[in-house]
Amino acid sequence: MPRLRLGTPFWVDKSEVPAARFPALRRQISADLAVVGGGITGAAIAWRFARAGVRVALLDGARAGRGSTAASTALLMQEPDTDYAELTDRYGETRTRRIWQLSRIATREMVRTIGQLDIRCDLARRDSVYYAPDADGAARLEREHRRRRAAGFGGRWLDGLQLEKETGIDAAAAIRTRGNAQVDPYAACAGFMHAAAGRGALIFERSAVHRIAVSRDHVTAITGRGSVRADRVIVATGYATPYFKPLLGRFTMRNTYVVVTRPLTASERRRLGLGAVMLWDTDRPYYYARWTSDHRLMLGGADRPQVKGSRRDRALREGAKRVRDHFTSLYPMLADIKDEYAWEGLFAQTPDGLPCIGPHRRYPRHLFALGYGGNGMTFGFLASRLLLDWYLGKQTADHDLFAFGRLR
């Protein structure tokens, strides 16, 4: 498997989470459910299933939370990467409205759950500002805004002057949306892991699954030194690993790049003009920005098709420069602000920008949560709820919205 990230993310470097948290699996055990993947999705699944009384064993090949989750910029967005209008053209009004409703519900539920579990992860509620750089983009964005409002999703329209006042950028127009949030993803993942363990889930790090054996009435996830026999297995690795070769064609692998500045002073923040919002644009691939709790600017984007092997180091430098150059063109004063972190993450994207959640006919006794695109925090948490309902025999039309079969 390729490395899920390159470089040291800000979250890992500043983390106060103890280095050694969970043991490696060194024996044969039994459980109701085996979860493969120890990122935020796997952690949320382990917590939700354990809370429901399911005996859970989670397996991560390295250190929980230090793969794609640590590379995330952790925007809890109720707005999918794919515009409402585009999804409506593909799936129709009724299905699109429900997809957006589920995304909004998942965002709100995740924020509420983090509070209830008292997870210390720099949770902050934030509006998003989705802006069009030019007049052509503004015309499309205005149509998008009308479609959203007609479907009940609101959002406040900002003209160029209002946009500059609220973000400090010179662009055509934007939609400002309430109800989103941001977190420290590594700390959030650790919090859900500990909450899952507190409910009885068994968590194992440095326990890569080499093979999953399937029989008529159980599966066995086999690691180098142990195994988990379970009723079912959930694969929450973010993308289809080479082990699931028939699924690879459903996903496009992409690299994304992030830079984080030094902390800005109060005076510098006022001069910059970006308020306490999460900023992203209508270009594809898009660029995005947010503040950290210690007043750093976190800037991301410059997504590109997966870069493999030795070329990744050079691609990281180039991608970080593209991100930096893009935002310096918006905020010229950033030319004098030093970057202290830069990293690259690997993620999977589906043709419609939505995840694949549920079973696949080729893999009996398996469930999957894969391909979240740039909205992994929200869709990962949504997956935990949909998969528990599926496990308990409560399948609904909501499951069809994210089924593998929709991508035929």
Image (cartoon, rainbow, N blue to C red):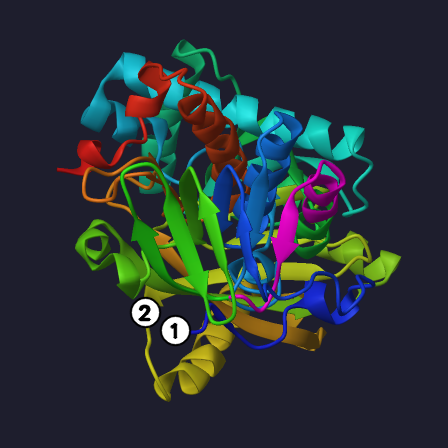
Give the structural element (helix, strand or loop) at label 2: loop
Task: State the residue at coordinates (78%, 64%).
Answer: 15
Give x and y (percent) for residue 380.
Answer: 50, 40
Give x and y (percent) for residue 31.
Answer: 53, 42
In this rendering, position of residue 215 left or right of residue 255: left
Quadrant that contains the N terminus = bottom left
Amino acid of disc 2: Gln
Residue 306 marker = 2
Displayed quadrant of residue 360: top left
> How far separated are the C-alphas under marks 1 and 2?
10 Å
Task: State the residue at coordinates (35%, 55%).
Answer: 212
Tell me if residue 2 can be seen: yes
Q: How many marks?
A: 2
Q: Are marks 1 and 2 in contact (CB under 8 Å)?
A: yes
**Mark 2 residue crowding within 10 angstroms, few (<14) / some (14–19) / many (20+):** some
Task: State the residue at coordinates (57%, 31%).
Answer: 54
In this rendering, position of residue 160 left or right of residue 14: left
Give the structural element (helix, strand or loop) at label 1: loop
**Magenta-drawn segment:** 193-207
| Residue 395 sits inside the magenta stretch | no
Quadrant that contains the C terminus = top left
Amino acid of disc 1: Pro
| Residue 194 sits inside the magenta stretch | yes
Give x and y (percent) for residue 123.
Answer: 75, 41
First along the sequence among labels 1 and 2: 1
Residue 2 marker = 1
Would you place residue 87 above or below residue 268 in this image?
above
Would you place residue 57 above or below residue 151 in this image?
below
The one nearer the camera, 9 or 69, is 69
